[in-house]
Image (cartoon, grey):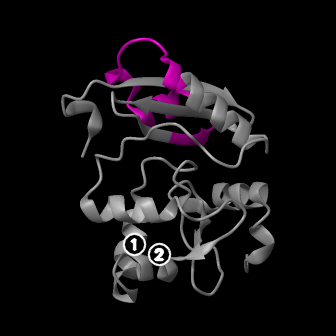
Amino acid sequence: MNRINDGVKRRGLVFDSPWGWMGVSETVRGIDRIVLPGRSKRVVETALGASGLQGQESARLSAVRRQLLDYLTGVRTTFDVPIDCSSGTVFQRLVWRTLRRIPYGTVRSYQWVADRVGGRAYARAVGNAVGANPLPIVIPCHRVVSHDRSLGGFSGGLSMKRKLLALEGSLPLLRT
């Protein structure tokens, strides 16, 4: 579902980070989208849907920006901002809640996630839900890898996944 055009008022923020430009947006319920670091402000604005956003920076957007910057510099390992996952299906939200239980510095397999949301037969559906995650980093989809300890996929690209896992110290656990 495209959250920009569904009548829900959103505010957003595009900011520069040590890893490149990033974007975040919120609804009244919480942070609803994070755009991973990119090379250009314009690309991030487009990915965030910045043209459909309203108002000025809120305290919540400032907080998530600070927390993301702290994470990218190795200062923070957890996040404590309210999130809004209402754009996902019931199954996607279940998967995303499960991903939030994967601790910093560790990895889990798609099968591990599937076992917790309905069984191994759900591994492919889990992969699709992981790929649809609107809040990467805060919902740590980068910590999900293939059962053989290879990287698997990542909507932000495998180089970004490697970089995030290296930051957390878990890259050596994998076959890369």
Give how far across and how far down residue 134 sits, in percent: 42, 48
Q: Is residue 104 left or right of residue 23?
A: right
Q: Between tags 2 and 1, which lies in front? A: 2
Going from N to C along the chain, the mark reached first, 2 or 1, is 2
Give how far across and how far down residue 82 sits, in percent: 45, 38
For the point 69% across and 68% down, the residue is: 106
Q: Which amino acid does label 1 sit on?
A: Val
Residue lying furthest left: 7
> What range of the chain is rendered magenta?
35-61
In terms of secondary structure, where does tag 2 sit? helix
**Disc 2 to disc 1, C-alpha distance:** 7 Å
Query: Is residue 150 among the parts visible in the rendering?
Result: yes
Label pair 2/1, CB-CB below 8 angstroms: yes
Q: Mark 1 points at which residue?
A: 126
Q: Which of 19 and 98 is in front in this view?
A: 98
Q: Which of 130 and 47 is in front in this view?
A: 130
Q: Mark 2 points at which residue?
A: 113
Q: Is residue 51 magenta-colored?
A: yes
Give how far across and how far down residue 114 sits, in percent: 42, 79
Q: Is residue 149 magenta-colored?
A: no
Give how far across and how far down residue 44 sits, in percent: 51, 33
- Name above or below for residue 151 compared with residue 76: below
- Name above or below for residue 142 compared with residue 107: above
In terms of secondary structure, where does tag 1 sit? helix
- Name above or below for residue 102 compared with residue 125: above
**Image quarter for residue 132?**
bottom left
Q: How crowded is mark 1: few (under 14 residues within 10 Å), some or many (20 or more)?
A: many
Query: Is residue 131 among the parts visible in the rendering?
Result: no
Q: What residue type is labelled 2?
A: Val
Q: Which corner quadrant holds the C terminus?
A: bottom right
